[in-house]
Image: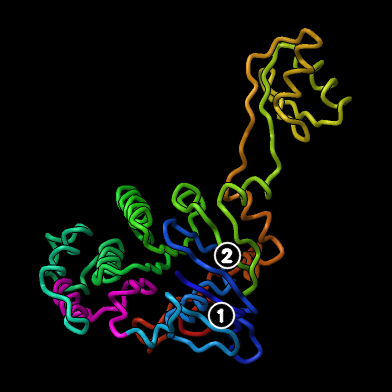
Amino acid sequence: MIEAENLTKRYGDKTAVDDLSFTVVPGRVTGFLGPNGAGKSTTMRLLLGLDRPDRGDARIHGRHYRDLNAPLRVVGALLEARAVHTGRSAYNHLLCLAQTQGIGRKRVEEVVELVGLAGAARKRAGGFSLGMGQRLGIAAALLGDPSVLVLDEPVNGLDPEGIVWVRTLMQRLAAEGRTVFVSSHLMNEMAVTAEHLIVIGRGRLIADCSTEEFIERSTEKTVTVRSPDAARLADIVAAEGGKAAPGDDGLLTVTNMEAPRVGELAAAEGIVLHELTPTRGSLETAFMELTRESVEYGAAAGAVPAPGPAPGAVPGIVPSEEGEPR
């Protein structure tokens, strides 16, 4: 279990995390969502003791990360997959981590096989593609067979097959009773992966609920109707307080009215229906609606793309959305 209580973190006059409290329980995949600059990376760093909060507390299984005797056996984390010694092979990178925790070579071989790097395990990690680097980072997170997983954008750079593999892996680990906490910007992927969502904006909690509840309470429900007498049906729907937007070939998109009521009105007037389909909102639409007031960084027309890394930038230290190392 992960517990965050009144977490607050400031960098100068910038508040990255603002009185944030939530609990991540075992047995389900919990998605961690928020716009760029919301404070997700900072929150994960606070959970793992990489930053100290100005106020509040963060515990894993009731203890601070720094107090865990063998942290890799309790918490597996992926915050920056490319934070590896580029001259080492994938196998040796994992072996070095394993030896710090009393983990044997057999486990190293198991995770290499699990993440699909068996054929590249003896190659230097510096030559890995983005997707291979992600697999190596996931292998490191799984090395200690931990009961808690904290994963920041684990599918970044993976192909469709790799994305499905990570999704299946996270769901399987959660089904085994582990705590799985994962951030992502891929809304469609989170919609089919996470059972529960924690959503933040500008460092503050926006939602802490099931994925289904988040979608249901945050999006306008619509009903797709197709009829050869669409114009008359539209007038009837409007008279009953609904809204019907016409489309092609007798299509109507009805809002402010449930599908059963549309069907009842059509039946009462003898109107033939070729289609009557309630349309469930998407996680992406719900996310955009609920976080609209919390977006800190947005593109403007004619905006100039951000420059690349500054000369002399240190590899492995990536600025967060808040301007501090992630």
30 displayed left or right of 255: left
The residue closer to the viewer here, 324 or 111, is 111
Residue 179, horizontal then vertical, whole percent: 41, 64
Residue 313, horizontal then vertical, whole percent: 39, 86
- Looking at the rendering, the stretch of residues picked out in magenta corresponds to 69-98
Q: Read off the residue under disc 2.
A: 34
Element type at marker 2?
Answer: loop
Q: Are marks 2 and 1 in contact (CB under 8 Å)?
A: no
The residue closer to the viewer here, 260 or 222, is 260
Count of marks overlaid on the render: 2
- Can residue 82 be seen here? The reply is yes
Element type at marker 1?
Answer: loop
The residue closer to the viewer here, 292 or 104, is 104
Mark 2 or mark 1: name the one nearer the start of the chain: 2
Q: Quadrant of residue 117?
A: bottom left
- Can residue 159 be seen here? The reply is no
The amino acid beneath tag 1 is: Glu
191 displayed left or right of 272: left
Residue 320, horizontal then vertical, whole percent: 50, 78
Disc 2 residue crowd, few under 14, some 14–19, many 20+, Cα 10 Å: many
Q: In the rendered image of this protein, does residue 77 appear above or below residue 237? A: below
Tag on residue 69?
Answer: none
Tag on residue 322?
Answer: 1
Q: Residue at x 15, y 63 (%)?
A: 110
Is 170 part of what is drawn in magenta? no
